[in-house]
Amino acid sequence: MDYYEINLTLSPFSADISEIVVAEFADLGCDSFTDTENGINAYIAKNIFDENKIKSAVANLENITKINYSTTYIEKQNWNVIWESNFEPVVIGDLCTIRAPFHHNLPKTKYEIVIMPKMSFGTGHHATTYLVAEALLNIDVTNLQILDMGCGTGILSILAAMRNAAHVDAIDIDEWAYTNAIENIRENNTEKKVSVILGDVKQINGKSYDLILANINRNIIISDIKYYAQSLKNGGILIISGILTEDISAIETEAKKYKLKKIAEKNRDKWARVVFGI
């Protein structure tokens, strides 16, 4: 799949404003982001690129920052070069190191995950991926049946498998993410415990899970949360992220319709992780 890079220059620029802009463009379908000196580069698949929607998003944000933007068409064979120049290793809680194949001589941690992200979301850099990975490091997933909905690179599935989950279904609607997740899962020797599935929430029909991870975005979560509730075993846990703190109340309202009760929440850089039980 080919992509467009949307170069966004923000004035004024701050970390807080940057997070809000990322959330807006994630709702357009942008699935990867890199920081620049004065803004953000957002990446969106060619087949869903719509410049009118970009203009509308820029207009929606004009009350907090002025945005100048340009777009560049990127063929998929150029993507590895882009990531090699931007992807830095991540350490989560002194327990897990996330690195690319070209990173060496890093501190040793209990878990080491090798990710070649290509065009897939999920390297541990974004606050939402970090938050869900952190949760996985702090709960016992031994022998659990797990769903990783919107798996991106497969990073969360890999970590769950390393922490002795019985099995993980890793699902993503994007073909590039599907292919990349398979590659990363094989690279980390977790293919026996992880099934990568191309598709949407319909793929979980008739299945049941002890733990569901949904690190996607606000609109998809609100639309699909009823299916997560239907697929959670009694006593199961749903961990949601990909949302801003201001979105929590809307998620809670929808969750209550399906007897999901909020257990906990944690924030990082204005992004949120919310845990529900049933």
Image: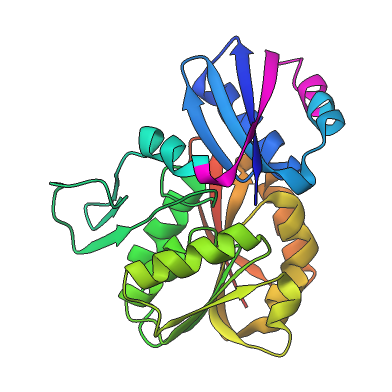
Which quadrant would the C terminus be assigned to in this image? Answer: bottom right
* Residue at point 50%, 61% (across, down): 180
Looking at the picture, tell me which residue is in the foreground, 253 or 66. 66
Q: Position of residue 185 (x, y in %)?
A: 40, 70
Q: Is residue 61 magenta?
A: yes
Compared to residue 150, the image places residue 77 above or below, namely above
From which residue to which does the magenta span run?
57-77
Q: Position of residue 13 (x, y in %)?
A: 55, 14
* Residue at point 41%, 61% (across, down): 135
Q: Which quarter of the picture shows residue 29?
A: top right
* Residue at point 67%, 51% (across, down): 217
Colour basis: rainbow
Q: Is residue 87 magenta?
A: no
* Residue at point 55%, 42% (across, down): 271
Q: Position of residue 25 (x, y in %)?
A: 69, 36
Compared to residue 36, the image places residue 124 above or below, namely below
Left or right of 229 in this view: 211: left
Looking at the picture, tell me which residue is in the foreground, 224 or 173. 173
Compared to residue 51, the image places residue 260 above or below, namely below
Looking at the picture, tell me which residue is in the foreground, 72 or 94. 72
Compared to residue 99, the image places residue 138 above or below, namely below
Examine the rendering and report whether any part of residue 251 can be seen: yes
Q: Which quarter of the picture shows residue 64?
A: top right
Left or right of 113 in this view: 33: right
